[in-house]
């Protein structure tokens, strides 16, 4: 299993909206960055991702699971190369993990969230996953 972090502005698509989609999940639409798109294409069914509220809050608030691998983004214009994956909410983080907390944790100094903070879909190492889960009140 691989681990990821996906970002959404909560006033556009929030954790609560994701949870309401239930087991069916929802397409992760609107990614318009080539590096983020390549990360979407690497995601496999069953992979897990942190659901991160960007701009407002700036914190990981939950965990989602990839339930469908990449396919063309239905919100893209014809001929555009953008893709989506479908994700479903798995569980909230009992304690949201802020960007400030991530920056303060020495074990996370190499995390892409710090070093490439604008990327909306990014990989997370297994060690980073365990650390953030622990910080958020979960067992990894």
Image (spheres, helix red, strand yellow):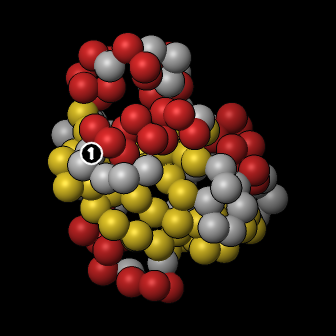
**Residue plotted at (24% across, 68% down):** 16
Q: Is residue 46 left or right of residue 13?
A: right
Q: Position of residue 62 (x, y in %)?
A: 33, 57
Q: Is residue 14 above or below residue 3?
A: below
The quarter of the rendered structure image containing the N terminus is bottom right
Residue 110 position within the rendered picture, expressed as x and y whole percent measured from the top left: 52, 17
Q: Residue at x 43, y 50 (%)?
A: 140
Above or below residue 109? Residue 34 is below
**Secondary structure beneath disc 1?**
loop
Please state which of residues 133 and 61 is positioned toward the viewer in this rendering.
133
- Look at mark 1 in the image and give the residue it sits on: 136
Query: Residue 68, located in which quarter of the rendered image?
Result: bottom right
Say left or right for 89 vs 111: left
In percent of the image, x 45 and y 63: which residue is there? 64
Q: Nearer the viewer, residue 37 or 138?
A: 138
In this rendering, position of residue 138 left or right of residue 31: left
Give how far across and how far down residue 76 sits, in percent: 65, 60
Task: Tell me where residue 116 appears, x and y as whole percent.
Answer: 52, 21
Indicate whether 36 appears above or below 105.
below
Residue 52 appearing in the image:
no
């Amino acid at each position: 299993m691989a681990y990821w972090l996906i970002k959404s502005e909560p006033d556009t698509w929030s954790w609560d909206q994701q949870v309401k989609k239930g087991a069916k999940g929802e397409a992760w639409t609107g990614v318009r960055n080539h590096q983020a798109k390549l990360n979407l294409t690497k995601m496999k069914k069953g992979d897990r991702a942190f659901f991160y509220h960007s701009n407002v809050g700036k914190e990981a608030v939950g965990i989602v699971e990839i339930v469908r691998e990449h396919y063309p983004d239905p919100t893209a214009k014809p001929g555009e190369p953008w893709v989506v994956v479908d994700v479903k909410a798995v569980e909230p983080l009992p304690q949201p993990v802020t960007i400030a907390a991530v920056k303060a944790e020495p074990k996370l100094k190499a995390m892409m969230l710090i070093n490439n903070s604008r990327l909306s879909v990014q990989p997370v190492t297994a060690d980073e996953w365990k650390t953030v889960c622990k910080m958020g009140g979960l067992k990894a």
